[in-house]
Each structure stands twice: as structure tokens, then as C-alpha cells.
Image: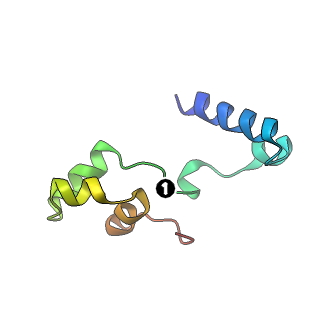
Amino acid sequence: MDDYLDQLRRSLEQDLGLVPSDKARARPAAKDGVSLIITKEQRAQLRERGFTEEEIRNMTPAQAHRHLGIAHPDE
């Protein structure tokens, strides 16, 4: 699934002229980029840290990742 999404992203970037295709291929992995989602495992870890379902639901992925200590330095 990750390969499919990566190919789709590169294709869209190239079609929209956002990133030259050679740079899109050389882009770092998603773990080094922007936080896009909160996984089920991360939700469980947040609950273990005392966050309620409502708090987790209202968090952005970047906020959740910061609480878990996995945020990218630029976030």
C-alpha cells in the first residue's frame, strides 16, 4: 500500500508541476516528512498516556506525534 501511495504522490506532483520527477524519487521516506495520520497503535499509546477518545479525535497528527515523541523536528 505504501508503494502505491508513494507512486500516486509522485505522479500527482509531476502532473501538477510541484516537484520535478527526479526530486520526487529522491524524497525522504514518509517517516522523515509531515505527519499525516494517527495510527491505531498511536491512538492506543495516547490512551495509555491518559488522553481521552475525544482529545485524540480532536488532535492533529502532528500534535499526537509530538505527544508520543515521534514528531519530525520541523513540525
Label 1's element? loop
Determine the residue positioned at 19% across, 56% down. 54
- Nearer to the camera, 58 or 2: 58
Residue that appears at 23% across and 55% down: 45
Q: Residue furthest bottom?
A: 73
Residue 59, compared with residue 23, is above or below; it is: below
Q: Position of residue 26 (x, y in %)?
A: 76, 48
- The residue indicated by pointer 1 is 35
Residue 32 x, y percent position in the rendering: 58, 57
24 sits to left or right of 42: right
* Left or right: residue 30 compared with residue 49: right
- Residue 75 to residue 40: above or below: below
Kindly identify the residue that appears in the image at 80 percent across and 35 percent down: 15
Q: Quadrant of residue 16?
A: top right
- The x and y percentages for residue 39 are 35, 45
Answer above or below: position of 16 versus 36: above
Residue at (26% x, 51% y) in the render: 43
Q: Position of residue 24 (x, y in %)?
A: 76, 45
Q: Looking at the rendering, which quadrant does residue 34 occupy?
A: bottom right
* Mark 1 surroundings: few (<14), some (14-19) or many (≥20) residues within 10 A: some
Question: Disc 1 marks which amino acid?
Answer: Ser
- The mark total stands at 1
Query: Is 75 placed left or right of 14 in the picture?
Result: left
Report the colour scheme.
Answer: rainbow
Residue closer to the observer: 73 or 13? 13
